[in-house]
């Protein structure tokens, strides 16, 4: 899918390139909207503090070395699994893998960290290495990582505070608590009867 900007600087699709993703009508419709929603945030953060904006993009995480970036390995794993998914002929295994890929995507913490940090920078705050610390815990137990829903709630509140509520739109569209819980608690369910296309 090839994208361009209109006279007002908004993204739109100008050409389908024939790849698998561009065949999907939902993807084609959502991509320009998501680009437009997120670009406003990127521009606001860069305008407020170029240094803070660059920190967000570099994803500074303290001590690191080559091959230590879990988000980069997650992206490679998801790309590989999407290719595997496209080769599966049987519907049930394909659907299970499809749901697992969805679950893995919504669990990846880096997109939430990036958006929360950009929102804080746009609001005059600073980049933080760990935007979503563990919840609960004690001196002997470290607590649990916040759920995607908790992170999204914080991002929604921050986007409203900075006057950019559209930033949270894509997150609200992709997040489904029941589906995520079904995927990761292995309670996947499928309709007992097939709905035939008429």
Image (cartoon, rainbow, N blue to C red):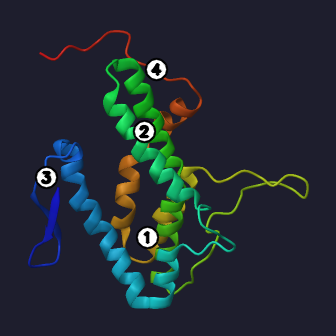
First in sequence, mark 3 or 2: give its number: 3
Residue shown at 19% from the left, 51% from the top: 28
Residue at 42%, 39% (x, y): give it.
81
Q: In this view, does 157 lie above or below 184?
A: below
Q: Nearer the viewer, mark 2 or mark 1?
A: 2
For marks 1 and 4, the one nearer the N-term is 1
Query: Quadrant where the C terminus lies?
Result: top left
Residue 17, label in figure: 3
Location of residue 54 with respect to 178 vertically, above or below: below
Residue designated by label 1: 159
In this picture, residue 196 sits left or right of residue 48: left
Q: In which quarter of the image is the N terminus?
A: bottom left
Q: Which of marks 1 and 3 is in front?
A: 3
Q: Position of residue 35 (x, y in %)?
A: 27, 65
Q: In which quarter of the image is residue 133?
A: bottom right
> 86 or 117, which is in the foreground?
86
Question: For the residues marked 4 and 3, what is the alpha-carbon distance in whole angstroms?
Answer: 35 Å
Distance of label 1 from label 3 (alpha carbons): 34 Å
Secondary structure, mark 2, is: helix
Question: Which element carries disc 1, helix, strand or loop?
Answer: helix
Residue 81's mark? 2
Q: CB atoms at circles 1 and 3 under 8 Å apart? A: no
- Where is residue 57 drawn, in percent x and y? 47, 75
Q: Circle 4 is placed at which residue position?
A: 189
């Amino acid at each position: 899918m090839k994208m361009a900007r209109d006279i007002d600087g908004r993204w739109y699709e100008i050409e389908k390139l024939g790849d698998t993703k561009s065949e999907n009508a939902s993807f084609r419709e959502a991509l320009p909207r998501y680009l437009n929603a997120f670009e406003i945030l990127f521009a606001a953060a860069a305008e407020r503090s170029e240094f803070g904006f660059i920190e967000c993009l570099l994803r500074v995480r303290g001590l690191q070395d080559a091959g230590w970036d879990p988000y980069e390995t997650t992206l490679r794993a998801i790309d590989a699994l999407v290719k595997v998914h496209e080769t599966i002929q049987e519907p049930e295994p394909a659907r299970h893998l499809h749901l697992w890929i969805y679950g893995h995507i919504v669990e990846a913490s880096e997109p939430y960290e990036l958006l929360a940090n950009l929102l804080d920078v746009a609001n005059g705050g600073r980049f933080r290495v760990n935007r979503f610390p563990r919840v609960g815990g004690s001196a002997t137990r470290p607590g649990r990582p916040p759920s995607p829903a908790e992170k999204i709630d914080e991002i929604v509140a921050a986007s409203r505070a900075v006057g950019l509520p559209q930033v949270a739109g894509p997150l609200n569209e992709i997040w489904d608590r029941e589906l995520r819980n079904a995927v990761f608690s292995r309670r996947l369910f499928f309709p007992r009867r097939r709905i035939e296309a008429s």
